Amino acid sequence: MTESSSAFPIVILTGAGISKESGLSTFRDADGIWATVRIEDVATPEAFAADPDRVHAFYNARRRGLTDSTIKPNAAHEALARLEREWPGDVLVVTQNIDDLHERAGNRNLIHMHGELLKARCTRCKNIAFWDMDMSVNTGCPSCGQKGGMRPHVVWFGEMPFMMETIYETLEKCGLFLSIGTSGNVYPAAGFVQAVRGAGTAQTVEINLEPSEGATLFDDGVYGPATEMVPQVVDQILRYTA
């Protein structure tokens, strides 16, 4: 990476690869979640309409897994929280992950573009609430009290990710874009590097276990375990402010 102003904004995109070393399953690996269950059965609005019990069971299991005491932020999450604390400019983490490991590590300027597993949304009154328990079709909304309308506060296939306008506005202004632990084939996130390149204002770096499908779109690539590579890159970035 080439030295620049010490206060340029940084945008970081994270995917399942950053949480894998904390013990959470990825989606698209050979042994990932989508190898054991069909997307169409549990992660679409149509699936929820057809069989809400099955969809609730899937997300209940994932929620219980996330709240297991053995699941904790790893060194990569902690390094990004350190970057947010110590960098003199703005740092925004945009995560495709629905876990809360970035928050637990200390990140505060954070967008969950695909929603949050530990939140629930009422389709009747639109209230969003913290939720760390199982949920079913008989669960009542804590706001309006109606049953049958509660769903996980996650973005399903066919739905629009959250805060896209804010994300693109920030991408256009950043001076450094990091993509960490992503497959490079899930849009719209896979297109973020092209948006940054189109603006012509930022250096782009991919940090991944191995090159993603979009690796050639980045200026630089850093490959290896996230728990090793991300702290190294953060150390390098923060040397600009020393």
Image (spheres, helix red, strand yellow):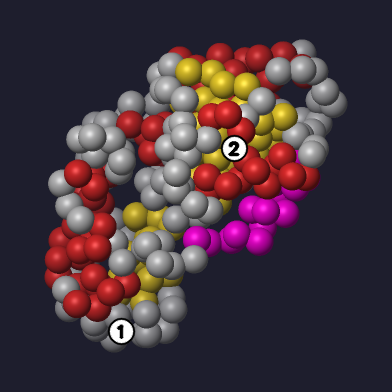
Q: Position of residue 184 (x, y in %)?
A: 47, 39
Q: Could you tell whether 172 is left or right of 132 in the image?
A: right
Q: Is label 1 in a helix, a strand or a loop?
A: loop
SS majority, magenta? helix
Task: Sort mark 1 into few (<14), some (14-19) or many (20+) by Cα contacts within 10 Å.
Answer: few
- Contact (Cβ within 8 Å) of mark 2 with mark 1: no
Q: Earlier in the sequence, mark 2 or mark 1?
A: 2
Quick check: is 242 in the magenta stretch? no
The amino acid sitting under disc 1 is Gly
- Report the front residue among 155 and 157: 157
**Label 2 belongs to which residue?**
12
Quadrant housing residue 147? bottom left
Residue 91 seen? no
Mark 2: which secondary structure? strand
Q: Residue at x 41, y 22 (%)?
A: 209
Determine the residue positioned at 20% across, 63% down: 41
* Quarter where residue 45 is shown: bottom left
Q: Position of residue 43 (x, y in %)?
A: 29, 61
Q: CA distance from mark 2 to mark 1?
A: 38 Å
What residue would you read off at disc 1?
145
Dividing the picture into quarters, in which one does residue 232 lie?
top right
43 in relation to 198, above or below: below
Give the residue type that dot 2 points to: Ile
Residue occupying the point 37% across, 80% down: 123
